């Protein structure tokens, strides 16, 4: 893979939360504002970190310990009203992501974002933080969409990037992302700077781990053209 296009660059699908962007503070602040409204005890940033990746209803259920569906529906509605005004207060790209994206664009790597986060949040966050790079598509979750780890949308994005699934690296910070990649026949890459520790990712057996965005550049530069998605190759 190089900027002269001597061989076709692979494609990359990125997860958003915990992979490209650190959204944890805004999510935690929004949940705790909702809990304050109902006089429920606040929860810690670390507790929310371990729960992100579930659906919003499941996130609020686990964070609150509330199982009543009517109360949970109220919490979801309250959260949506709060988070839409907070989602860019503290959210930032992780250190090293900007030069990584610069290098991938220079190398003509087509890129997409696929998140289980609702599109009404995914689109504004991506447009605010990622608009300077020519992503092929930002895809948040819509009501009728299949959600990760279902591979349907990932495969649609591969077609938009004009890459067969084995030529696509799926990069994320959770076992859900790794399973999505495997279900789609893509190369699963786990980042270790996000919301899951490396130990938590091992059971999903990613093909590669990257501990810093620059390592993803090195990984793609060594792309062989087709990857065995069932073999681990941790970078040194």
Image: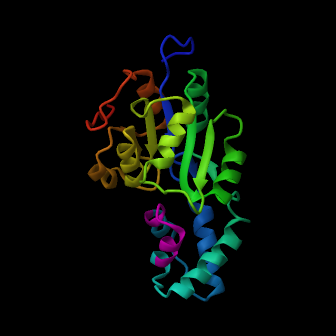
- The residue under the point 40% across, 48% down is 180
Relative to 82, is 185 on the left or the right?
A: left
Residue 232 image position (x, y, % from top left): 27, 37
- The residue under the point 54% across, 57% down is 145
Q: Report the number of discs.
A: 0
Corner quadrant of residue 35: bottom right
Residue 173 image position (x, y, % from top left): 44, 49
Nearest the camera: 233 or 179?
179
- Magenta stretch, main secondary structure class: helix
Residue 156 image position (x, y, % from top left): 52, 42
- The residue under the point 42% across, 53% down is 150
Residue 86 image position (x, y, % from top left): 70, 64
Q: Is residue 69 placed above or below 6 in the rendered structure?
A: below
Which image quadrant: the C terminus? top left
- The residue under the point 47% across, 51% down is 194
Task: Please check the rendered image and state whether residue 51 is part of the magenta-colored stretch, yes or no.
Answer: yes
Corner quadrant of residue 110: top right
> Is residue 41 visible in the rendered structure shown here?
no
> Is residue 153 visible in the rendered structure shown here?
yes
Relative to 109, is 134 on the left or the right?
A: right
Look at the image and name its color scheme. Answer: rainbow
Q: Is residue 108 placed above or below 123 in the rendered structure?
A: above
Q: Is residue 25 placed above or below 167 in the rendered structure?
A: below
Region in magenta: 50-61
Task: Please check the rendered image and state whether residue 40 is part of the magenta-colored stretch, yes or no.
Answer: no
């Amino acid at each position: 893979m190089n900027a002269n296009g001597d061989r076709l660059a692979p494609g990359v699908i990125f997860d958003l939360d915990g992979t490209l962007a650190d959204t944890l503070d805004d999510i935690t602040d929004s949940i705790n504002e909702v809990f304050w409204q109902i006089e429920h005890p606040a929860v810690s940033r670390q507790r929310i970190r371990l729960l992100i990746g579930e659906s919003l209803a499941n996130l609020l259920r686990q964070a609150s310990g509330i199982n009543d569906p009517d109360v949970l529906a109220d919490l979801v509605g309250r959260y949506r009203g709060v988070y839409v005004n907070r989602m860019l207060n503290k959210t930032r790209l992780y250190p090293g992501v900007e030069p990584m994206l610069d290098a991938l664009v220079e190398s003509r790597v087509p890129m997409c974002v696929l998140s289980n986060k609702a599109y009404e949040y995914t689109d504004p966050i991506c447009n605010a933080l990622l608009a300077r790079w020519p992503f092929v598509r930002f895809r948040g979750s819509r009501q009728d969409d299949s959600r990760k780890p279902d591979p349907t949308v990932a495969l649609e994005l591969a077609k938009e990037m004009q890459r067969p699934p084995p030529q696509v690296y799926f990069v994320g910070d959770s076992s859900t992302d790794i399973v999505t990649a495997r279900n789609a026949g893509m190369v699963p890459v786990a980042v270790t700077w996000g919301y899951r520790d490396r130990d938590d990712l091992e059971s999903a057996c990613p093909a590669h781990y990257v501990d810093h965005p620059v390592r993803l550049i090195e990984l793609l530069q060594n792309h062989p053209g087709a990857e065995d998605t069932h073999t681990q190759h941790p970078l040194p």
